[in-house]
Amino acid sequence: MSFTLATWNINSVRLREPIVLQLLREEAPDVLCLQECKSPVELIPTAGFADLGYPHMVARGQKGYNGVAILSKIPLEDAGSLDLAQLGHARHVAARLPNGVTIHNHYVPAGGDVPDRAQNEKFGQKLDYLTELRDIFAAQKPQRSILVGDLNIAPREDDVWDHKKLLKIVSHTPIEVAHLNEVMSAGHWVDVTRQDIPDGLLYSWWSYRAKDWDAADKGRRLDHVWATSDISAAAHSSRVLREARGWEKPSDHAPVFASFDL
């Protein structure tokens, strides 16, 4: 079974339904994982997706915040969700493909602006979310699994526009990177994107605050595609669809793609 998967923080699936439809028409991934849907599940505009050949969806939602969804051409089985750090947020959903591969879609908390849990509760919640995820993977090693989403951390020096300037900025601090690496090690995950694109600057997010995001190019790679080590060799053709950041009424994130032959 061969399929292409994309992950995209859409920053409101209802507000940005037109560009979701544009992506489905122009790029036609078999599976599209969305984060920050900002919608109850029953209000996600599924009719337009189904018309384009995506009749299957597994999702968790809440009004106005968070929310994750997996849209698919391929039949999906709901494989549950986690409430990490007991936040009561819709930040994770899992779906199983007919070949037994489980896709985990995560929206990790952004963590606020101050990288100190004593001063900033949101930063502590982010670290706790990652710690619980690490412990889950350590207790029960995942197999034949793919993990995607807006993990809100750019782990490598070449995942940000200026490593030294961002060392004290939330999303690239050493403590966040260490927590993310522990999650990866505990589950024997492989960073598929960097497996395919091992060298060079690579971003998936550019701030709305930049007057000309493309020219300034002060990006970060916050969106990830991982696979467990038993299937990571089947992954290929990773890419970031940078141009989507410039579409009409865009998200501040661009979609990240990978293909799998399983």
Image (cartoon, rainbow, N blue to C red):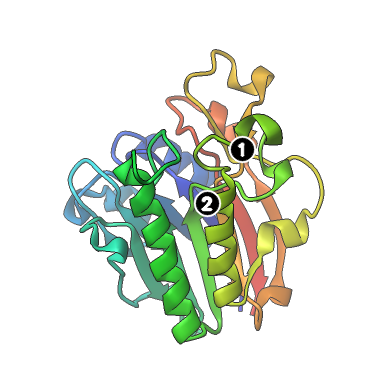
- Residues 245 and 117: in front is 117
> Left or right of 202: which side holds 52?
left
Q: Label for residue 167? A: 1
Residue labelled with disc 2: 176
Across and down, in percent, residue 86 comes to 24, 63
Q: Which amino acid, by three-letter code, is at mark 2?
A: Glu
At 44% from the left and 45% from the top, the residue drawn is 9
Quadrant assignment, res 29: bottom right
Comparing 106 with 44, the one in front is 106
Q: Quadrant of residue 164?
A: top right
Instruction: Please state if 216 lies on the left or on the right of 168 as rendered.
Output: right
Left or right of 98? Residue 196 is right
| Residue 52 image label | none
Q: Mark 1 packing: few (<14 Cα in 10 Å), some, or many (20+)?
A: some
At x 39%, y 69%, the residue is 132
Q: Nearer the viewer, residue 100 or 3?
A: 100
**Residue 152 position in % (x across, y down):** 49, 47
Residue 53 seen? no
The residue at the point 33 percent across, 40 percent down is: 120
Mark 2 and mark 1 lie on one chain; the one further toward the N terminus is: 1
| Label 1 residue SS | loop
